[in-house]
Image (tube, rainbow, N blue to C red):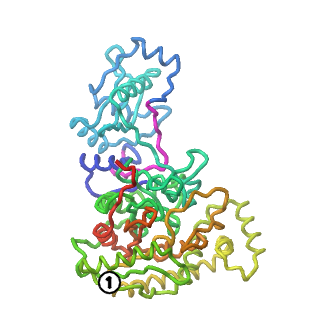
Amino acid sequence: MSTTQSFEITPQVLLRAYSIGMFPMADSADDPTLFWVDPEERGIFPLDGLIVSRSLAKLVRSDRYEVRVDQDFDAVIEGCAGGGADRPKTWINQRIRKLYGDLFHQGFVHTVEAWRDGELVGGLYGVQMGGAFFGESMFHTARDASKVALVHLVARLRAAGAIVMGKSNVPVALADWQSSNPIHGRTHNPYDLTRSAGGSSGGAAAALAAGLTALEVGSDIGGSIRMPAHFCGVFGHKPTPGLIPMRGHGLNPDAGPADLTVAGPLARSGADLELAFAILAGADEASGTPWRLDLPAESRTSLVGARIAVLSDDASFPVDCAISGALTRLAARLADAGAIVTHDPALPLPSQDIYRLYLQLLRGATAARLDDAGLAEAIAKADALDPADESYGALMLRYLTQRHADWLKADGRRHRLQHAWRGWFGEYDALICPAAPFTAFPHISGIPKEQQRMMVNGAPAPAADAYFWLGIPTVSGLPATTMPIGQDPSGLPIGAQLITPAWTDRRALRLASLIGKFEAPPAYQ
Protein backbone atom coordinates (compact mmCIF):
# COMPACT_ATOMS: atom_id res chain seq x y z
CA MET A 1 0.00 0.00 0.00
CA SER A 2 1.27 3.51 -0.69
CA THR A 3 0.14 7.09 -0.23
CA THR A 4 1.62 10.40 -1.32
CA GLN A 5 1.83 13.16 1.27
CA SER A 6 1.94 16.94 0.86
CA PHE A 7 3.30 17.77 4.36
CA GLU A 8 7.04 18.19 4.96
CA ILE A 9 8.87 14.93 5.55
CA THR A 10 11.62 15.60 8.07
CA PRO A 11 14.18 13.07 9.34
CA GLN A 12 12.09 12.76 12.51
CA VAL A 13 8.92 12.02 10.51
CA LEU A 14 10.90 9.46 8.50
CA LEU A 15 12.02 7.66 11.65
CA ARG A 16 8.43 7.57 12.95
CA ALA A 17 7.33 6.10 9.64
CA TYR A 18 9.95 3.35 9.89
CA SER A 19 8.71 2.57 13.39
CA ILE A 20 5.35 1.54 11.89
CA GLY A 21 6.83 -0.29 8.90
CA MET A 22 6.52 2.44 6.25
CA PHE A 23 9.12 4.09 4.01
CA PRO A 24 9.11 6.75 1.26
CA MET A 25 9.77 6.32 -2.45
CA ALA A 26 9.62 8.42 -5.60
CA ASP A 27 8.37 7.34 -9.00
CA SER A 28 11.68 8.38 -10.58
CA ALA A 29 14.88 10.26 -9.85
CA ASP A 30 13.40 13.32 -11.56
CA ASP A 31 10.09 13.25 -9.66
CA PRO A 32 10.21 15.77 -6.77
CA THR A 33 7.33 14.10 -4.89
CA LEU A 34 7.46 11.19 -2.45
CA PHE A 35 4.87 8.60 -1.51
CA TRP A 36 4.67 6.34 1.54
CA VAL A 37 4.87 2.59 0.98
CA ASP A 38 3.58 -0.19 3.24
CA PRO A 39 3.96 -3.32 1.08
CA GLU A 40 1.85 -6.44 1.46
CA GLU A 41 5.01 -8.53 0.99
CA ARG A 42 8.52 -7.74 2.26
CA GLY A 43 11.91 -9.26 1.47
CA ILE A 44 13.34 -10.75 4.67
CA PHE A 45 16.92 -11.94 5.12
CA PRO A 46 16.99 -14.58 7.90
CA LEU A 47 20.04 -13.81 9.98
CA ASP A 48 20.38 -17.39 11.19
CA GLY A 49 19.47 -19.01 7.90
CA LEU A 50 21.21 -16.96 5.21
CA ILE A 51 22.77 -19.43 2.81
CA VAL A 52 26.17 -18.40 1.42
CA SER A 53 27.50 -20.40 -1.52
CA ARG A 54 30.96 -21.89 -1.37
CA SER A 55 32.23 -19.56 -4.06
CA LEU A 56 30.85 -16.47 -2.28
CA ALA A 57 32.24 -17.62 1.07
CA LYS A 58 35.65 -18.06 -0.58
CA LEU A 59 35.38 -14.57 -2.04
CA VAL A 60 34.44 -13.08 1.34
CA ARG A 61 37.52 -14.68 2.95
CA SER A 62 39.82 -13.42 0.18
CA ASP A 63 41.42 -10.00 0.00
CA ARG A 64 39.81 -9.02 -3.27
CA TYR A 65 37.54 -6.44 -1.63
CA GLU A 66 38.17 -4.27 1.41
CA VAL A 67 34.98 -3.83 3.44
CA ARG A 68 34.44 -0.49 5.17
CA VAL A 69 31.51 0.83 7.22
CA ASP A 70 30.08 4.37 7.19
CA GLN A 71 32.95 5.87 5.23
CA ASP A 72 31.31 7.44 2.15
CA PHE A 73 27.51 7.67 2.29
CA ASP A 74 27.30 10.09 -0.64
CA ALA A 75 29.18 7.69 -2.91
CA VAL A 76 27.05 4.74 -1.82
CA ILE A 77 23.72 6.44 -2.47
CA GLU A 78 25.10 7.80 -5.76
CA GLY A 79 25.94 4.24 -6.76
CA CYS A 80 22.50 2.99 -5.71
CA ALA A 81 20.84 5.79 -7.68
CA GLY A 82 22.99 5.28 -10.75
CA GLY A 83 20.79 2.70 -12.46
CA GLY A 84 22.44 0.45 -15.03
CA ALA A 85 21.65 -1.96 -17.83
CA ASP A 86 19.58 -4.17 -15.53
CA ARG A 87 18.02 -1.22 -13.69
CA PRO A 88 17.52 1.70 -16.09
CA LYS A 89 15.18 3.57 -13.72
CA THR A 90 15.81 4.56 -10.11
CA TRP A 91 13.49 5.85 -7.39
CA ILE A 92 16.19 7.75 -5.49
CA ASN A 93 15.52 11.46 -6.06
CA GLN A 94 17.13 14.49 -4.43
CA ARG A 95 14.72 14.46 -1.47
CA ILE A 96 15.59 10.83 -0.75
CA ARG A 97 19.30 11.68 -0.86
CA LYS A 98 18.86 14.64 1.52
CA LEU A 99 16.63 12.79 4.03
CA TYR A 100 18.82 9.71 4.32
CA GLY A 101 21.95 11.86 4.29
CA ASP A 102 20.64 13.76 7.30
CA LEU A 103 19.86 10.46 9.07
CA PHE A 104 23.37 9.24 8.23
CA HIS A 105 24.89 12.23 9.99
CA GLN A 106 22.55 11.63 12.95
CA GLY A 107 23.72 8.01 13.24
CA PHE A 108 20.54 6.28 12.06
CA VAL A 109 21.65 5.36 8.51
CA HIS A 110 24.67 3.13 7.94
CA THR A 111 26.57 1.95 4.91
CA VAL A 112 28.55 -1.22 4.24
CA GLU A 113 31.01 -0.61 1.41
CA ALA A 114 33.18 -2.83 -0.80
CA TRP A 115 36.39 -1.16 -2.03
CA ARG A 116 39.07 -2.35 -4.50
CA ASP A 117 42.29 -0.49 -5.25
CA GLY A 118 40.97 2.63 -3.55
CA GLU A 119 37.71 2.68 -5.55
CA LEU A 120 34.18 2.02 -4.25
CA VAL A 121 32.82 -0.88 -6.31
CA GLY A 122 29.77 -1.94 -4.34
CA GLY A 123 27.78 -1.43 -1.19
CA LEU A 124 24.48 -0.92 0.53
CA TYR A 125 22.76 1.42 2.96
CA GLY A 126 19.86 1.16 5.38
CA VAL A 127 18.22 2.51 8.51
CA GLN A 128 18.98 1.17 11.98
CA MET A 129 16.40 1.57 14.75
CA GLY A 130 17.14 -0.25 17.98
CA GLY A 131 17.80 -3.87 17.09
CA ALA A 132 16.27 -3.68 13.61
CA PHE A 133 18.03 -2.85 10.33
CA PHE A 134 15.91 -1.80 7.35
CA GLY A 135 17.90 -2.35 4.15
CA GLU A 136 17.19 0.28 1.52
CA SER A 137 19.29 -0.27 -1.60
CA MET A 138 22.51 -1.81 -2.87
CA PHE A 139 24.70 -1.61 -5.98
CA HIS A 140 27.83 -3.03 -7.55
CA THR A 141 30.19 -2.18 -10.40
CA ALA A 142 32.42 -5.21 -9.79
CA ARG A 143 31.31 -8.83 -9.69
CA ASP A 144 29.64 -9.88 -6.38
CA ALA A 145 30.84 -6.74 -4.58
CA SER A 146 27.36 -5.97 -3.20
CA LYS A 147 26.96 -9.61 -2.09
CA VAL A 148 30.18 -9.35 -0.09
CA ALA A 149 28.82 -6.21 1.58
CA LEU A 150 25.56 -8.02 2.39
CA VAL A 151 27.35 -10.98 3.99
CA HIS A 152 29.37 -8.61 6.17
CA LEU A 153 26.17 -6.75 7.14
CA VAL A 154 24.48 -9.98 8.25
CA ALA A 155 27.54 -10.97 10.25
CA ARG A 156 27.55 -7.61 12.04
CA LEU A 157 23.82 -7.82 12.74
CA ARG A 158 24.21 -11.30 14.18
CA ALA A 159 27.01 -10.12 16.43
CA ALA A 160 24.89 -7.18 17.60
CA GLY A 161 21.87 -9.38 18.39
CA ALA A 162 19.59 -7.71 15.83
CA ILE A 163 15.88 -8.51 15.62
CA VAL A 164 14.37 -8.93 12.15
CA MET A 165 10.69 -7.98 11.75
CA GLY A 166 8.72 -9.41 8.81
CA LYS A 167 5.29 -9.28 7.23
CA SER A 168 2.44 -10.66 9.33
CA ASN A 169 0.13 -13.46 8.19
CA VAL A 170 -3.09 -13.17 6.17
CA PRO A 171 -5.60 -15.68 4.76
CA VAL A 172 -5.63 -16.75 1.13
CA ALA A 173 -6.92 -13.89 -1.06
CA LEU A 174 -7.55 -11.86 2.14
CA ALA A 175 -10.94 -13.56 2.23
CA ASP A 176 -11.56 -15.05 5.66
CA TRP A 177 -12.12 -14.13 9.31
CA GLN A 178 -9.21 -16.36 10.28
CA SER A 179 -5.63 -16.05 9.03
CA SER A 180 -4.51 -19.40 7.70
CA ASN A 181 -2.80 -20.16 4.40
CA PRO A 182 -0.79 -23.05 2.95
CA ILE A 183 2.46 -21.05 2.86
CA HIS A 184 2.72 -19.61 6.36
CA GLY A 185 0.27 -21.79 8.26
CA ARG A 186 -2.26 -20.65 10.85
CA THR A 187 -2.20 -17.57 13.07
CA HIS A 188 -3.38 -18.21 16.64
CA ASN A 189 -5.16 -15.80 18.94
CA PRO A 190 -2.79 -14.66 21.73
CA TYR A 191 -5.64 -14.94 24.27
CA ASP A 192 -6.45 -18.55 23.33
CA LEU A 193 -4.24 -20.41 20.88
CA THR A 194 -7.11 -22.68 19.85
CA ARG A 195 -9.06 -19.72 18.42
CA SER A 196 -8.93 -17.42 15.42
CA ALA A 197 -7.04 -14.13 15.46
CA GLY A 198 -9.43 -12.84 12.81
CA GLY A 199 -8.85 -11.96 9.18
CA SER A 200 -7.70 -10.76 6.91
CA SER A 201 -5.36 -8.74 9.16
CA GLY A 202 -5.22 -11.51 11.76
CA GLY A 203 -1.44 -11.71 11.79
CA ALA A 204 -1.24 -7.97 12.31
CA ALA A 205 -3.72 -7.94 15.20
CA ALA A 206 -2.10 -10.98 16.86
CA ALA A 207 1.35 -9.39 16.58
CA LEU A 208 0.03 -6.22 18.22
CA ALA A 209 -1.70 -8.07 21.05
CA ALA A 210 1.41 -10.18 21.66
CA GLY A 211 3.66 -7.12 21.79
CA LEU A 212 5.66 -8.04 18.68
CA THR A 213 5.03 -4.70 16.97
CA ALA A 214 3.65 -1.27 17.80
CA LEU A 215 1.56 -0.39 14.75
CA GLU A 216 0.13 -2.20 11.73
CA VAL A 217 -1.75 -1.34 8.53
CA GLY A 218 -4.58 -3.37 6.98
CA SER A 219 -7.39 -3.08 4.49
CA ASP A 220 -11.12 -3.49 5.06
CA ILE A 221 -14.12 -4.25 2.87
CA GLY A 222 -15.73 -6.98 4.95
CA GLY A 223 -14.25 -6.44 8.40
CA SER A 224 -10.59 -7.23 7.69
CA ILE A 225 -9.42 -4.54 10.11
CA ARG A 226 -12.32 -4.53 12.55
CA MET A 227 -12.82 -8.28 13.06
CA PRO A 228 -9.14 -8.97 13.97
CA ALA A 229 -9.11 -5.91 16.25
CA HIS A 230 -12.23 -7.24 17.99
CA PHE A 231 -10.86 -10.79 18.30
CA CYS A 232 -7.43 -9.68 19.57
CA GLY A 233 -8.44 -6.80 21.82
CA VAL A 234 -6.66 -4.01 19.93
CA PHE A 235 -7.71 -0.82 18.15
CA GLY A 236 -8.42 -0.65 14.41
CA HIS A 237 -9.75 2.14 12.20
CA LYS A 238 -11.81 1.80 9.02
CA PRO A 239 -11.62 5.33 7.57
CA THR A 240 -13.97 7.30 5.38
CA PRO A 241 -13.35 5.96 1.83
CA GLY A 242 -10.74 7.94 -0.06
CA LEU A 243 -8.94 9.42 2.95
CA ILE A 244 -6.09 6.91 2.82
CA PRO A 245 -4.97 6.17 -0.76
CA MET A 246 -4.97 2.53 -1.83
CA ARG A 247 -2.22 2.86 -4.44
CA GLY A 248 0.31 0.08 -3.94
CA HIS A 249 -2.05 -2.13 -1.92
CA GLY A 250 -2.80 -4.63 -4.68
CA LEU A 251 -0.52 -6.65 -6.92
CA ASN A 252 -1.64 -4.68 -9.99
CA PRO A 253 -0.46 -1.06 -9.58
CA ASP A 254 -2.71 0.12 -12.44
CA ALA A 255 -5.94 -1.29 -10.98
CA GLY A 256 -8.59 1.20 -9.98
CA PRO A 257 -9.96 1.44 -6.44
CA ALA A 258 -12.44 -1.25 -5.44
CA ASP A 259 -15.84 -0.15 -4.18
CA LEU A 260 -16.14 -0.12 -0.36
CA THR A 261 -12.46 -1.02 0.17
CA VAL A 262 -10.36 1.14 2.47
CA ALA A 263 -6.98 0.92 4.22
CA GLY A 264 -6.38 1.86 7.81
CA PRO A 265 -4.16 1.42 10.87
CA LEU A 266 -4.25 -0.95 13.85
CA ALA A 267 -2.60 -0.28 17.23
CA ARG A 268 -2.66 -1.13 20.92
CA SER A 269 -3.83 2.36 21.91
CA GLY A 270 -6.07 5.06 20.56
CA ALA A 271 -3.21 7.56 20.71
CA ASP A 272 -1.03 5.37 18.47
CA LEU A 273 -3.98 4.95 16.11
CA GLU A 274 -4.37 8.73 15.85
CA LEU A 275 -0.65 9.07 15.08
CA ALA A 276 -0.77 6.43 12.35
CA PHE A 277 -3.86 8.01 10.79
CA ALA A 278 -2.12 11.40 10.69
CA ILE A 279 0.73 9.83 8.69
CA LEU A 280 -1.43 7.77 6.34
CA ALA A 281 -4.29 10.13 5.49
CA GLY A 282 -4.02 12.55 2.59
CA ALA A 283 -4.39 13.05 -1.12
CA ASP A 284 -2.53 10.80 -3.51
CA GLU A 285 -0.64 13.42 -5.51
CA ALA A 286 0.63 10.84 -7.98
CA SER A 287 -2.94 10.33 -9.20
CA GLY A 288 -3.30 14.00 -10.10
CA THR A 289 -6.09 14.67 -7.61
CA PRO A 290 -6.26 18.38 -6.64
CA TRP A 291 -7.74 18.07 -3.13
CA ARG A 292 -5.81 18.45 0.09
CA LEU A 293 -6.63 17.03 3.52
CA ASP A 294 -8.66 19.44 5.67
CA LEU A 295 -10.65 17.31 8.10
CA PRO A 296 -12.65 18.76 11.00
CA ALA A 297 -10.43 19.17 14.05
CA GLU A 298 -11.17 17.22 17.24
CA SER A 299 -9.98 18.81 20.46
CA ARG A 300 -12.12 17.14 23.14
CA THR A 301 -10.26 15.65 26.09
CA SER A 302 -13.25 14.17 27.96
CA LEU A 303 -16.62 12.54 27.33
CA VAL A 304 -18.59 15.28 29.06
CA GLY A 305 -21.48 16.31 26.83
CA ALA A 306 -20.74 13.74 24.10
CA ARG A 307 -24.00 12.51 22.57
CA ILE A 308 -23.49 8.77 22.18
CA ALA A 309 -26.00 6.18 20.98
CA VAL A 310 -25.32 2.59 22.07
CA LEU A 311 -26.86 -0.25 20.06
CA SER A 312 -26.28 -3.55 21.86
CA ASP A 313 -28.45 -6.08 20.00
CA ASP A 314 -30.79 -6.66 17.08
CA ALA A 315 -33.80 -8.97 16.73
CA SER A 316 -32.79 -10.16 13.24
CA PHE A 317 -29.07 -10.47 13.96
CA PRO A 318 -28.75 -11.45 17.64
CA VAL A 319 -25.61 -10.71 19.60
CA ASP A 320 -24.12 -13.02 22.21
CA CYS A 321 -25.08 -11.93 25.71
CA ALA A 322 -21.41 -11.51 26.70
CA ILE A 323 -21.06 -8.79 24.06
CA SER A 324 -24.44 -7.12 24.56
CA GLY A 325 -23.80 -7.16 28.31
CA ALA A 326 -20.41 -5.50 27.83
CA LEU A 327 -22.08 -2.78 25.75
CA THR A 328 -24.73 -2.22 28.40
CA ARG A 329 -22.02 -1.83 31.04
CA LEU A 330 -20.11 0.49 28.73
CA ALA A 331 -23.20 2.69 28.33
CA ALA A 332 -23.39 3.06 32.11
CA ARG A 333 -19.71 4.03 32.30
CA LEU A 334 -20.19 6.60 29.55
CA ALA A 335 -23.09 8.16 31.41
CA ASP A 336 -21.03 8.25 34.61
CA ALA A 337 -18.31 10.07 32.65
CA GLY A 338 -20.75 12.80 31.62
CA ALA A 339 -21.83 11.58 28.19
CA ILE A 340 -25.43 11.86 27.04
CA VAL A 341 -26.31 8.24 26.28
CA THR A 342 -29.20 6.90 24.21
CA HIS A 343 -29.90 3.17 24.39
CA ASP A 344 -30.77 1.10 21.31
CA PRO A 345 -31.90 3.86 18.90
CA ALA A 346 -33.64 3.08 15.63
CA LEU A 347 -31.31 3.13 12.63
CA PRO A 348 -32.12 5.00 9.40
CA LEU A 349 -33.13 1.71 7.73
CA PRO A 350 -34.43 -1.62 9.09
CA SER A 351 -31.58 -4.01 9.85
CA GLN A 352 -32.57 -6.50 7.12
CA ASP A 353 -32.47 -3.71 4.53
CA ILE A 354 -29.00 -2.58 5.62
CA TYR A 355 -27.76 -6.18 5.56
CA ARG A 356 -29.05 -6.93 2.07
CA LEU A 357 -27.89 -3.61 0.61
CA TYR A 358 -24.41 -4.15 2.02
CA LEU A 359 -24.21 -7.71 0.68
CA GLN A 360 -25.36 -6.56 -2.77
CA LEU A 361 -22.66 -3.89 -3.00
CA LEU A 362 -20.04 -6.06 -1.30
CA ARG A 363 -20.49 -8.97 -3.68
CA GLY A 364 -20.80 -6.57 -6.59
CA ALA A 365 -17.30 -5.40 -5.69
CA THR A 366 -15.77 -8.82 -5.05
CA ALA A 367 -17.23 -10.25 -8.28
CA ALA A 368 -14.32 -8.58 -10.08
CA ARG A 369 -12.01 -11.12 -8.42
CA LEU A 370 -13.63 -14.01 -10.31
CA ASP A 371 -12.03 -15.24 -13.50
CA ASP A 372 -14.20 -16.28 -16.45
CA ALA A 373 -14.50 -19.88 -15.27
CA GLY A 374 -15.37 -18.83 -11.72
CA LEU A 375 -17.99 -16.40 -12.96
CA ALA A 376 -19.56 -19.02 -15.22
CA GLU A 377 -19.73 -21.45 -12.29
CA ALA A 378 -21.34 -18.80 -10.06
CA ILE A 379 -23.94 -17.99 -12.74
CA ALA A 380 -24.85 -21.67 -13.12
CA LYS A 381 -25.26 -22.04 -9.36
CA ALA A 382 -27.31 -18.85 -9.08
CA ASP A 383 -29.63 -19.98 -11.88
CA ALA A 384 -30.25 -23.26 -10.06
CA LEU A 385 -31.26 -21.62 -6.75
CA ASP A 386 -34.70 -22.01 -5.25
CA PRO A 387 -36.32 -18.53 -5.53
CA ALA A 388 -37.40 -18.86 -1.90
CA ASP A 389 -33.82 -19.44 -0.68
CA GLU A 390 -32.81 -16.32 1.30
CA SER A 391 -29.73 -17.80 2.98
CA TYR A 392 -26.45 -15.92 2.89
CA GLY A 393 -25.03 -18.42 0.38
CA ALA A 394 -27.93 -17.81 -1.98
CA LEU A 395 -27.74 -14.05 -1.63
CA MET A 396 -24.00 -14.17 -2.25
CA LEU A 397 -24.46 -16.04 -5.53
CA ARG A 398 -27.24 -13.74 -6.72
CA TYR A 399 -25.22 -10.61 -5.94
CA LEU A 400 -22.01 -11.98 -7.47
CA THR A 401 -23.91 -12.42 -10.74
CA GLN A 402 -26.33 -9.47 -10.59
CA ARG A 403 -27.07 -7.30 -13.63
CA HIS A 404 -25.39 -3.92 -13.79
CA ALA A 405 -28.80 -2.25 -13.75
CA ASP A 406 -29.55 -3.93 -10.42
CA TRP A 407 -26.24 -2.73 -9.02
CA LEU A 408 -27.01 0.83 -10.13
CA LYS A 409 -30.33 0.69 -8.28
CA ALA A 410 -28.52 -0.54 -5.17
CA ASP A 411 -26.01 2.29 -5.52
CA GLY A 412 -28.91 4.73 -5.58
CA ARG A 413 -30.26 3.24 -2.35
CA ARG A 414 -26.79 3.62 -0.85
CA HIS A 415 -26.77 7.35 -1.59
CA ARG A 416 -30.22 7.77 -0.05
CA LEU A 417 -29.01 5.93 3.04
CA GLN A 418 -25.97 8.21 3.26
CA HIS A 419 -28.31 11.20 3.22
CA ALA A 420 -30.41 9.61 5.96
CA TRP A 421 -27.32 9.09 8.11
CA ARG A 422 -26.47 12.80 7.85
CA GLY A 423 -29.83 13.59 9.40
CA TRP A 424 -29.49 10.82 12.00
CA PHE A 425 -26.14 12.17 13.18
CA GLY A 426 -27.74 15.55 13.74
CA GLU A 427 -28.89 14.07 17.07
CA TYR A 428 -25.81 12.03 17.96
CA ASP A 429 -22.05 12.51 17.90
CA ALA A 430 -21.35 8.79 17.62
CA LEU A 431 -22.92 5.34 17.44
CA ILE A 432 -21.37 2.45 19.36
CA CYS A 433 -22.37 -1.09 18.32
CA PRO A 434 -20.90 -4.60 18.15
CA ALA A 435 -18.08 -5.33 15.74
CA ALA A 436 -19.49 -8.87 15.48
CA PRO A 437 -22.14 -10.95 17.28
CA PHE A 438 -19.55 -13.43 18.60
CA THR A 439 -16.05 -13.39 20.06
CA ALA A 440 -13.05 -15.23 18.61
CA PHE A 441 -14.17 -18.66 17.43
CA PRO A 442 -12.27 -21.98 17.44
CA HIS A 443 -10.13 -22.65 14.37
CA ILE A 444 -12.17 -23.96 11.42
CA SER A 445 -10.89 -26.15 8.61
CA GLY A 446 -12.63 -27.46 5.52
CA ILE A 447 -15.92 -25.55 5.88
CA PRO A 448 -16.61 -22.77 3.34
CA LYS A 449 -17.14 -19.39 4.93
CA GLU A 450 -20.74 -19.17 3.73
CA GLN A 451 -21.54 -22.43 5.56
CA GLN A 452 -19.83 -21.64 8.85
CA ARG A 453 -21.90 -21.28 12.01
CA MET A 454 -20.93 -19.71 15.32
CA MET A 455 -22.25 -20.16 18.82
CA VAL A 456 -24.40 -17.20 19.90
CA ASN A 457 -26.22 -17.46 23.23
CA GLY A 458 -25.62 -21.21 23.30
CA ALA A 459 -27.05 -21.94 19.84
CA PRO A 460 -25.45 -22.09 16.37
CA ALA A 461 -26.04 -19.04 14.19
CA PRO A 462 -24.82 -18.16 10.68
CA ALA A 463 -21.37 -16.61 10.78
CA ALA A 464 -22.58 -14.31 8.00
CA ASP A 465 -24.82 -12.50 10.50
CA ALA A 466 -21.68 -10.52 11.31
CA TYR A 467 -22.07 -8.81 7.94
CA PHE A 468 -25.00 -6.79 9.30
CA TRP A 469 -22.87 -5.24 12.04
CA LEU A 470 -19.86 -4.77 9.77
CA GLY A 471 -22.09 -3.36 7.06
CA ILE A 472 -23.61 -0.55 9.14
CA PRO A 473 -20.66 1.81 8.51
CA THR A 474 -19.24 0.16 5.40
CA VAL A 475 -22.25 0.41 3.10
CA SER A 476 -22.59 4.14 3.83
CA GLY A 477 -18.92 5.08 3.83
CA LEU A 478 -18.81 6.01 7.51
CA PRO A 479 -15.60 5.90 9.59
CA ALA A 480 -15.58 3.21 12.27
CA THR A 481 -12.98 2.67 14.97
CA THR A 482 -12.99 -0.72 16.70
CA MET A 483 -11.91 -0.41 20.33
CA PRO A 484 -11.52 -2.98 23.13
CA ILE A 485 -14.24 -2.59 25.80
CA GLY A 486 -13.74 -5.68 27.94
CA GLN A 487 -13.54 -9.47 27.94
CA ASP A 488 -16.04 -12.32 27.99
CA PRO A 489 -16.17 -14.81 30.92
CA SER A 490 -13.47 -16.96 29.30
CA GLY A 491 -11.09 -14.03 28.89
CA LEU A 492 -11.60 -13.43 25.18
CA PRO A 493 -11.51 -9.77 24.10
CA ILE A 494 -14.68 -7.87 23.20
CA GLY A 495 -14.44 -5.01 20.73
CA ALA A 496 -17.05 -2.46 19.71
CA GLN A 497 -17.34 -0.21 16.69
CA LEU A 498 -17.49 3.53 17.27
CA ILE A 499 -19.08 5.09 14.18
CA THR A 500 -19.26 8.80 13.33
CA PRO A 501 -20.41 10.83 10.28
CA ALA A 502 -18.41 10.70 7.06
CA TRP A 503 -15.18 12.74 7.18
CA THR A 504 -15.20 12.96 11.00
CA ASP A 505 -12.50 10.32 11.40
CA ARG A 506 -10.66 12.40 13.97
CA ARG A 507 -13.77 12.42 16.15
CA ALA A 508 -14.07 8.63 15.95
CA LEU A 509 -10.39 8.18 16.78
CA ARG A 510 -10.44 10.60 19.70
CA LEU A 511 -13.60 9.16 21.26
CA ALA A 512 -12.24 5.62 20.90
CA SER A 513 -9.02 6.77 22.55
CA LEU A 514 -11.01 8.12 25.49
CA ILE A 515 -13.19 5.00 25.81
CA GLY A 516 -11.23 1.88 24.80
CA LYS A 517 -8.46 0.18 26.74
CA PHE A 518 -6.10 -2.60 25.75
CA GLU A 519 -5.90 -5.52 28.19
CA ALA A 520 -2.85 -7.65 27.54
CA PRO A 521 -3.10 -11.44 27.08
CA PRO A 522 -1.87 -13.59 29.98
CA ALA A 523 1.63 -14.22 28.61
CA TYR A 524 2.21 -10.63 27.46
CA GLN A 525 5.53 -9.04 28.46
Q: Quadrant of the N terminus?
A: bottom left
Question: Vertically, is 114 above or below 31?
Answer: above
Question: Vertically, is 441 above or below 108?
Answer: below
- Count how many numbered circles sit on residues in the image: 1
Q: Using the image as rendered, state which of residue 187 and residue 363 is in the foreground.
A: 187
Q: Using the image as rendered, state which of residue 471 and residue 260 is in the foreground.
A: 471
Measuring from the top left, give residue 281's x and y in whole percent. 35, 62
In which quadrant of the rendered view does residue 424 lie?
bottom left
Question: Vertically, is 56 above or below 380?
Answer: above
In which quadrant of the rendered view does residue 150 lie?
top left
**Residue drawn at (41%, 40%) of the image:** 90
Identify residue type, mark 1.
Answer: Val
Q: Name the residue under label 1.
A: 341
Q: Is residue 206 left or right of residue 308?
A: right
**Residue drawn at (53%, 78%) of the image:** 318
Measuring from the top left, give residue 323's x and y in whole percent. 45, 72
Magenta-colored stretch includes residue 404: no
Using a 10 Å C-alpha cutoff, classify the residue at mark 1 as few (fewer than 14 neighbours), some (14 to 19) or many (20 or more): many
Measuring from the top left, give residue 253's x and y in whole percent. 51, 53
Q: What stretch is highlighted in magenta?
A: 30-47
Q: Main secondary structure of the magenta part?
A: loop
Query: In the current view of this chain or complex, which residue is farthest to the top?
Result: 63
Magenta-colored stretch includes residue 44: yes
Q: Using the image as rendered, state which of residue 258 and residue 32 is in the foreground.
A: 258
* Label 1 SS: strand
